[in-house]
Amino acid sequence: MKKYKFEIGIISFMLLFALIIFGFYLVFETFKEKKDYTLFLNPFTILKCDEWKCEDASSLLDEYNNKSYNVYLNGNFVGKNDVFYNTSNTKFYVFNNKNDNIYEEDDIVFSYDGNAKIEQKKIVE
């Protein structure tokens, strides 16, 4: 056993170092996740955001389409609903838990997903 004392020490150090690095990674990802969010808007736009830096992800429609988002219609929060954009007829849909479309043609839709705290203020003209 004395012959392998150095090797055991090196392996133990490497395992401990790997666990510490993995711990830092998990902490960093947890903080980063709190700043990430996705905006799904009408007219059709998908923005993937990291804090205030947003990138257009509209070309990745299949990845974001038909998923649950926090939805505001005309400035009023209506809950977490499925948002769907149909590219064949360029129509926007917001489905409630009964699978009914609650979106009307003239509604202003704002929907987001993520841990960020976002509000839409209703402005009356």
Image: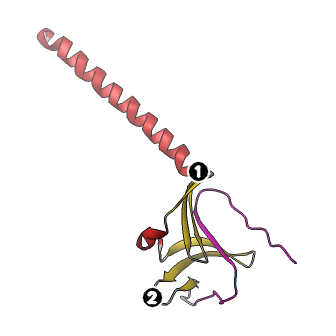
Q: Amino acid at mark 1?
A: Lys
Q: Position of residue 42 (x, y in %)?
A: 61, 77
Q: Could you tell me which quadrant the C terminus lies in?
A: bottom right
Tell me the quarter of the picture where residue 70 sits.
Answer: bottom right
Of the 4 image quadrants, the one containing the N terminus is: top left
Q: Nearer the viewer, residue 65 or 79?
A: 65
How is the structure coloured here? secondary structure
Please name the residue that numbered disc 1 is placed on: 35
Mark 2 or mark 1, which has the lower sequence index? 1
How far separated are the C-alphas under marks 2 and 1? 33 Å
Q: Nearer the viewer, residue 4 or 37?
A: 37
Tag 1's secondary structure? helix
Residue 81 point in image, percent of width and height: 58, 77
Name the residue beneath numbered marker 2. Answer: 88
Q: Is residue 100 left or right of residue 106?
A: left
Q: Residue furthest right?
A: 125
Identify the residue shown where x is 57% and y is 90%: 100
Q: Name the element at disc 2.
A: loop
For this view, does 2 lie left or right of residue 94?
Answer: left
Q: Is residue 84 magenta?
A: no
51 is higher (above) or lower (below) than 67: above
Q: Height in image: 58 above or below 48?
A: below
Q: Is residue 58 above or below residue 29?
A: below
Residue at the image position 58 percent from the left and 89 percent from the top: 101
Look at the magenta stretch and give its main secondary structure. loop
On screen, 45 above or below 88? Answer: above
Residue found at x 43% / y 68%: 60
